[in-house]
Image (tube, coloured by chain):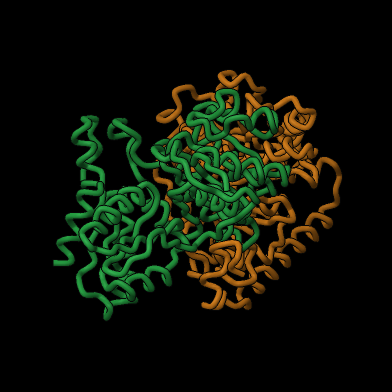
Amino acid sequence: MLLIRKFEEACAKGYSTGKIGGFLHLYIGQEAVGVGSIAALQEQDYIVSTYRDHGHAIARGLDLKAMMAELYGKRTGTSKGNGGSMHFFDKEKHFMGGHGIVGGHISLAAGIAFSSKYKKEDSVTMCFFGEGAANIGSFHEGLNLAAIWKLPVVFICENNHYAMGTPEYKALSVKDVSIRAVAYNIARDRIEGDEVRKVRDHIKVAVDRARRGEGPTLVEVSTYRFRGHSMSDPAKYRTKEELETHKKRDPLFKAFGDLIDAKVPKEDLSKFEEEINLKIEDAVQFAEESEEPPLSWMYNHVLAEDK
Amino acid sequence: MGNVTYREALNRAMVEEMQKDPLIFLMGEEVGHYQGAYKVSQGMLDKFGEARVIDTPISENGFAGIGVGSAMTGLRPIIEFMTWNFSLVAIDQIINSAAKMLYMSGGQFPMPIVFRGAGGAGGRLAAQHSQAFESWYAHIPGLKVIAPATPKDACGLLKSSILDNNPTIFIESEVLYGMKGEIPDEEFYIPLGKADIKREGSDISIITWSRALGFSMEAAEDLAKEGINVEVLDLRSLRPLDIDAIVQTVRKTNRAVIVEEGWPMAGFGAHVAYVIQKEAFDYLDHPVERVTQRDVPMSYAANLERESLPNATRIKEKIRSMLE
């Protein structure tokens, strides 16, 4: 979680100096959801993420250097510089993207789960999205198809209460997203997302259910992003007081407090933090020093036969 | 050589490939128990079972997405749209997911998927069910776009599309499903991206594809009686496009008319005209002309539909005017 936080802070810095371009959607504040959820997965499982994908990718163990290089648009990036912030992919780690169209990836995740079932593989697919995506057709079609075919997929709605600048009360006819599971006759769960182990334990139930062949679950995890929707968003649609209230429930404080309670020596924690700082520094340096993709790569990978 | 219908030829292509590779499956509305809305998948449920011939609810966006996700993990889906009109609710999955996946993942995820179904006008189906969308999909890098006009081409091109590792838009013609034609008894493939001269001629070239080939051939036969010798080039594949074949026929006849079922504005024929003036400008004895569907939504009225579509009469008039 700390690694994600510091990575995202380094991203914000890279963006403000013009090294990182495009849209940059930071995960700061939501770390416990991704980390807890992905901790419930096994190696053979799949993850499908949104345009806010850095946290999920780090939790899955993608290479930090390659991720930072991708953000810098370098040839050494996870997608060779073709994807950027919203399109992290790692076939080996079963990290199936970074998708930029809200909700479009939900039926795609159902398709990956369909594939596991078709091939009789013991894999579960985990799909992240925000509460904004719960209002688009692809969400409903994806959930219905996953339900009728009992696909091994866990749908995780990270409800950060704002779809860009639109608050949930203006957009959701029923504020409880998880209740939509009832309409598709699938299992549901609804939790607060500020405690990483609690998230893991709840998600594990859903993952196990999927793995047993008992079909999908829709889990709504309440969370809060401390930054704007993207770097260009000053988040004027919410009050300072609201933000400060949520910051007091920072999932990192809770995790830190738990470690202290567990009598982990403070010097170990400092050492851990120092290691993380070094990793981030290395990643930034790697990205800085990597080359841009050569212009001759422009037409690579448009079609499978283009190398 | 067997004499089979266009729909039987498509069925044979899918059956032959599915028998060889268990990773190929067919998914769409009414493809299984109903035996296909246009009976293209007749008998396939019995042959392959419900695990591989999969009926879906009416959720084009959803099952197109299922197809894309499954192709990311090594399956080879054939996704049937009952008609291409319904693909519009799935176009996000085709363009934003399927066509982009390989590129935006830096080459990690090829997309061996075929989207196929009926395109163009049927017969008096009116505005929402009578549309030729080849131009829309041909606009998109990352896709292949195929539009066969004969049973033999339908079979050979669909087999190649299924084996291809790219998202392939395979647009069949609704009115051609019952059309009969000779196809080889032995297994055969037709490569994607190769046009085919359907009629040799020396005075003028018609460049066409899909259903408009029929109108073009009819016009060519009629004009032969007037001593006008028309060459007819069937593109078959719009993306990749066989530019060499286009240039060769224009160099031979020095005149070209493009005949297409789609609308004129920003239509695929406009691109072909561009290619001709770019690559064969010095060989042209007349500006390139087009015969297209009229620039209106399709009417239900029989006479208006007939007059709206390209037809042999309009093609003949156009060609005579070009040879004056």
Vertical relation: A58 (above or below) B272: above
Position of residue B89 measured from the top left corner of the image (x, y, whole percent): 43, 37
- Asked if residue B303 lies left or right of residue A26, the reply is left
* Residue in front for this viewpoint, A132 or A101: A101
Q: Residue A32, located in which quarter of the rendered image?
A: top right
State the image coordinates of residue A134 (x, y, percent, origin top left).
51, 32
* Residue situated furthest bottom in the rendering: B282
- Which chain is green in the rendering? B
Q: Residue at x 75, y 43 (%)?
A: A45
User: Is residue B227 rendered to the left or right of residue A291?
Assistant: left
Relative to B140, say whether A43 is above or below: above
Residue A259 appears in view: yes
> Residue at horizontal 61%, vertical 56%?
B165
Q: Provide residue A99's location: percent of width, then percent of height.
A: 55, 49
Kindly indicate the quadrant of the structure image that contains residue B302. Answer: top left
The residue depicted at 29 percent of the width and 59 percent of the height is: B258
Numbered marks: total:
0
Q: Is residue A254 at least partly visible in the picture? A: no
Residue drawn at the location 55% of the way across and 78% of the way down: A294
Residue B109 or residue B297, whichever sits in front: B297
Q: Which quadrant is the C terminus of chain A positioned in?
A: bottom right
Point out residue A17 in the picture as x, y percentages from the top left corner.
49, 70
Q: The orange chain is which one?
A: A
The answer to whether residue A70 is left or right of residue B252 is: right
Closer-to-camera residue (B210/B5): B5
